[in-house]
Image: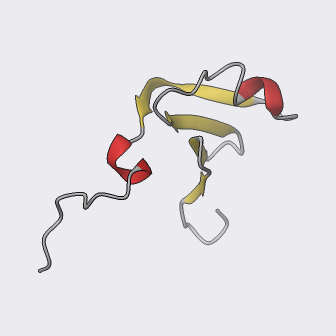
Amino acid sequence: MRRGQKVTYITERAVFRLRDDDTVELVEIAPGIDVHKQVLDLIDFDVRVADDLKEMDSRIFTDEPMGHRPR
């Protein structure tokens, strides 16, 4: 953050962003995950949930190609 870089934490369940005010914001959740029971209740620090919380693309959890083509 001090270098002006964005900080993102990615887990198998969720994506968090470090905000400019040093708070952590939950911005994406994996499909089928209960945000309270399987994420928020299990961490021991305060997390702000984004107003526009999104679901992670379900294709990243499969062994199938995601449909991207080589450049």
Which one is in front, 39 or 16? Answer: 39
Taking the image as drawn, is residue 63 in sight? yes
Q: Is residue 5 left or right of residue 41?
A: left
Which one is in front, 1 or 55? Answer: 55
When asked about the image quadrant of residue 41, the answer is top right
Q: How is the image coloured?
A: secondary structure
Q: Is 30 drawn above or below residue 53 in the view shown? A: below
When asked about the image quadrant of residue 67, the answer is bottom left
- At 46% from the left edge and 31% from the top edge, which residue is drawn? 31
Q: Is residue 62 left or right of residue 68?
A: right
Q: Quadrant of the C terminus?
A: bottom left
- At 14% from the left edge and 78% from the top edge, which residue is drawn? 70
- At 50% from the left edge and 26% from the top edge, which residue is drawn? 32
**Residue 9 picture location, percent across and down:** 62, 54
- Which residue is at the far bottom? 71
Exactly how many numbered labels are in the figure?
Answer: 0
Q: Is 27 drawn above or below residue 34 in the view shown? A: below
Q: Is residue 47 left or right of residue 55?
A: right
Taking the image as drawn, is residue 57 in sight? no
**Residue 1 picture location, percent across and down:** 64, 62
- Which residue is at the far right? 44
**Residue 16 picture location, percent across and down:** 60, 44
Q: Is residue 63 left or right of residue 10?
A: left
- At 61% from the left edge and 72% from the top edge, which residue is drawn? 3
Q: Is 26 drawn above or below residue 63 in the view shown? A: above
